[in-house]
Every structure is written in C-alpha cells, then in structure tokens.
Amino acid sequence: MKSQSRHSAAPGRGGSQSESVPPESALPSSSAPAPKVSWLGLPKFGWSLTLFGLCVYTFAVVTFKAPVGNAGAVIAIVGMLLQREKLRIPFPIWIFGSFLLWAFISSFASPYTDLVLDNIFEQLKLFMIMIVVVNALRTEGQLRFYLMFFLGCFVLFPVRGTLVGGDRIQGRAVWNFIYANPNDLATLCLLALGMALAVMFFAPRRPVVRLGAAVSALALIVVMFLSESRGAFIGLMAGMGWGLGRLGLKRPILTLLLGGVVALVLSMTIPPAVWERLSGIEKLTSTSTIAEADPEGSAEERFEIQQTAWRIFVGHPIFGVGFGMYRQVNAKYAPSLGEKDTHNTYLNLAAETGLPGLILWISLVVSVLLFAYRVRKQAAPDEVAEPQAWVERALFGYLVAAMFGTYVKLSFPYIMLGILWCWAKLKQSEPELLGEAKESRACAA
C-alpha cells in the first residue's frame, strides 16, 4: 500500500516521469524472466495486418505459385496506415527515395523518358516494400518468424524445384521465373544462406529448427555450385569466409563436423564440369587470359560489354542514359554485341543514372550495413548479435557478387536491408530503454 500511494502521489515532476518509463519487470535484464517461446524457439509475438500482408507478398515473389504479390503489398500498406505505432521512415529510406527522385529528374535527359518513368514506377514498388518491412518487423518474435518464413518459401520452391525438376542452360542448373538465370539463382541463394545460418544460431536452440536450417544451408550451397556461378562463388567466399574462419576458432569440433558433411555431399552431387568451370576464376584476373576462363567465351563477352558500359558512363556522367535503358543503349554503342546486360550492378547504375545515382544507391546499402555493424559491436555479444552477423555477411557477399551481375531491380536485397535495419534497431532499443529507466529512478530518488 505504501508503494502504491507513493506512485499515485506527486502528480507533478515525479509522477509524470514514473508514468513515462516502463516498469522494471518489462526491461531486459539478467534477473528478468525469460520471454515465452513456442516449440520452434520463437518468442511469442502478435500478428499485425502489415506482417500478414508482407508474408503474402513474400510468398508470391519467392515462390511464384500465386499471383497475389500486389494484393499482399496493398494489405501491408493498409495495415501500416492503420497501425497504432508511429510510422517508421529511417534514414536509409530517405536515401532510397532520393535515389528514385534523381532517377526521375535524370529521365528527362534521356531519349527514352516514357520507358524510364515506367521502370521508376516499378522501382517505387520496391521502395514501398522496404518501408513495409521496417514497419512490420517490430519485435524479435516477428523478425525471427519472418526469417524462417522467407527461408521456408525459398527452400521449398526454387531450391527444391532446381534440385528435383530444374532445367539446364549449357549444363548449369536453373529453375524458372527470376531463377531462370544461373547467376541470379546462385546470388539469391547466397542471401537465403545468410538467413539459414542465422536461424541455425537462434536461441533457444531447438534441435528441429537447427536441423532444418542446416539442411536448408546445405541444399542452398549445392544449388549454388550446380549453377556454376563464379560471381556467386566469389561472393560466398568474400562474405562467409571470414565468419566461417572465426566459427572454426570458436567451435572447431562443430566446424570440422559441418565441413566434413558439406564436403561429402558436394563430392557426391557436384559433377567434375563444375569444378573445371570454377577453376577458371584465376583466368579472370588478367585481360590477357580472360578469354581462357571458359570454353563458351562468356567471360570475354562480359569484359567487352563492361568496356562499352564504361564508355556510356563517360559519355553521360551526370544524368546517365535513363534508368533501365542500358540494353538499348548498349546495342547503339556496340551493334556487334546487341542488347546485352552489363553483368555489373555498379557499372549499370553509373551508365543509367550517372555518378549521383550510383553514389545514392551505394549510400543506401552502406548506411544499413554500417548501422547494423555499429550497433552489434557496441552491444554485448548475445544470442541476437550472432545470427545478425550472418545476415550482414550474406549481404556483403551479395554486394561482391553484384560486380558480376545486375541486381538493382530485384526485391530480395531491399527486403534484406529492411530486415537488417530492424534487427539492429531491436538491439539498439535495449540499452536506450535501460538508460531511461536508470535516469528516471535517479531523479525519483
């Protein structure tokens, strides 16, 4: 009764502060009871219309099994507008918007203005999806569930489809839709691999979840090798190599066991032609040997295309030739090559949107990665930080692989950027909440 009267009295300074700060039992601390978790190890979470719409959209764009992507996006946006929580529009979103604004402005300097505006409208949809992601994933339970949902959709459809009934292009594994290009398939598998490794290190660690994530990661690696994508392989090594090395130092027995399983599966499933193609990576380091990198001559052709892309950029360094218009302009600059893709995200952006557009897009990605890295390093190592690191590494590997493919217009990287921002924001909010509580108790004393 005494404590109750103490809180109800003094409605002035002390009373307002006690009302604005959550009770100590709600704050994260070592003595606080552990949050309730489901049998899958997910913290209990509440559903929202925004999260439901995001899942519908994700199912559509990952699996291509139902044309409900636009419906899911509309549901998510309506839920976002009706939510009680404050609308989140973080700094990376403003950068993304600035990139689209610049693409719009530069479109009037392009001879293909109408086509450019159509492409910008399509990119505007991805802008809205990124806003949906950062507003839908507000709790750890929601974020973990969505990672598992995305991973499940990816493994059950494009991965399973590639392994069971996939096609071949010059011996390289593909599926269909956006996965019909072996390089795109492998690079998207790299993003999903980061999710699988993150799920493996979720806590509490449920055996069924860890086993499912491990099998998913193994299947993703097999598909990446069957695609024979050298760019994705370089991205895999650049993004995951350091993390796997650190894991080997921390948990050598587990790493040796997992490495042995992966090596055994790869030796049984990967044909010799794959290793022969991947061995051609060393030929890519010199212009004098690039023609020897592969028998079909794709590496040599890409080098010619990228030289053309550089000439296009030099000719249009500020406004570019128009967002999404590279193929048409490549045919004009190099008729012998025809309408070809740049096979390089950064050259593509430079040629289409000029140097300002390239800087804005890179700033979007780097701002999220730096924010996530900074928050993770400032916080104490725990069960949240370790899985987050694998998502960061996957996104970094994706950026390396983007030097060998054009991935600006795919939805997956923007979803990953939204996930990573939400993860870091969750981690950042814990010390802020504790600091506010301590300050309030000091003022009350």
Image: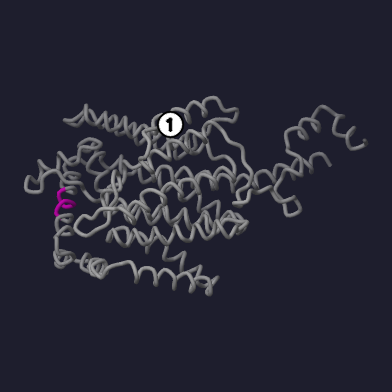
Can you name the residue that lies furthest to the left here?
A: 336
Q: Which residue is mark 1?
A: 73
Left or right of 19 on screen, residue 256 = left
Front residue of this view, candidates 121 and 315 = 121
Is the residue 263 above or below the residue 47 in the image?
below
Q: Which residues are magenta?
A: 304-308
Left or right of 285 on screen, residue 331 = left
User: Where residue 392 appears, x then y in whole percent?
Assistant: 46, 54
What residue do we see at 42% from left, 62% from top?
Answer: 218
Is the residue 200 above or below the residue 410 in the image?
below
Can you name the residue that lies furthest to the right here?
A: 2
User: Where residue 165 appears, x then y in whole percent?
Assistant: 30, 53
Q: Residue 127 appears in which quarter of the rendering?
A: top left
Tell me the amino acid under the disc marked 1: Ala
Q: Report if residue 252 lies within the magenta region.
A: no
Q: Residue 287 appears in which quarter of the rendering?
A: bottom left
User: Where residue 27 appears, x then y in whole percent?
Assistant: 71, 45
Is the residue 2 above or below the residue 174 in the image?
above
User: Where residue 61 appears, x then y in whole percent?
Assistant: 38, 40
> Is residue 377 among the parts visible in the rendering?
no
Front residue of this view, candidates 162 and 284 = 162
- Main SS, magenta residues: helix
Front residue of this view, candidates 297 and 243 = 297
Q: Quadrant of the N terminus?
A: top right
Can you name the residue that lies furthest to the front here?
A: 165
Is the residue 343 above or below the residue 360 in the image?
below
> Is residue 276 among the parts visible in the rendering?
yes
Graded by Cα atoms within 10 Å as few (under 14), some (14 to 19) or many (20 or more), the crowding at tag 1 reads many
Q: What secondary structure is marked by label 1?
A: helix
What residue do we see at 45% from left, 55% from top?
Answer: 194
Q: Quadrant of the C terminus?
A: top right
